[in-house]
Amino acid sequence: MAVKIYGIKNCNTMKKTFSLFDTMEEGYEFTDYKKQKPDQALLESFIDKLGLDTVVNRRGTTYRKLDDETKSALDKIDTAIPILQEKSSMIKRPILVFEDGSMQAGFDEDLIRSKY
């Protein structure tokens, strides 16, 4: 099983991630949220391992455009998941699932290299 990478293809952070894996000549399986919306089970697995605060990208434009009520709903797992499914741009990128089952959110070259 190759590492699984989740995100949005055209994101600059994603491009750095793909480039690193290509440079290291490591295979990966990519899932683009824009082509395949994340399901509840996938998001729950991310949140279980990484935490809700890590999974929700509060720095992007999509988050900043939300009204206060929706932003508050992102503080609870049961109300956050439907929002993240609908607005997948708000999921931290990339999320990597390594062969050992561990996960990483965001681009951290040293951490990625340490897995190989």
Image: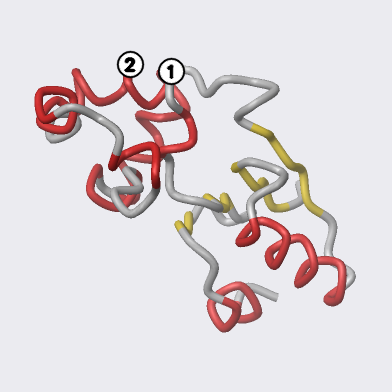
Depicted 23 relative to depicted 43: above or below: below
Please state which of residues 108 and 100 is positioned toward the viewer in this rendering: 108
Per the rendering, the mark at residue 58 is none
Q: Amino acid at mark 2?
A: Pro
Q: Is residue 29 left or right of residue 66?
A: right
The quadrant holding residue 77 is top left
Please name the residue shown 84% across and 57% down the image. 27
Residue at screen point 11% across, 30% down? 68
> Going 48% across and 61% down the picture, which residue do you hit?
106
Q: Which residue is mark 2?
A: 82
Q: CA distance from mark 1 to mark 2?
A: 6 Å
Q: Quadrant of the C terminus?
A: bottom right
Please state if 50 lies on the left or on the right of 52 as rendered: right
Instruction: Residue 56: give x, y in percent of width and height.
Output: 32, 43
Q: Are marks 1 and 2 in contact (CB under 8 Å)?
A: yes
Choose top left, top right, bottom left or bottom right for residue 66: top left
SS category of the residue bearing label 1: helix
Viewer-nearest residue: 2 or 112 = 112
Q: How many marks?
A: 2
Q: Secondary structure at mark 2?
A: helix
Q: Position of residue 7 (x, y in %)?
A: 60, 43
Mark 1 or 2: in front is 1
The amino acid beneath tag 1 is Glu
Numbered circle sitting on residue 86: 1
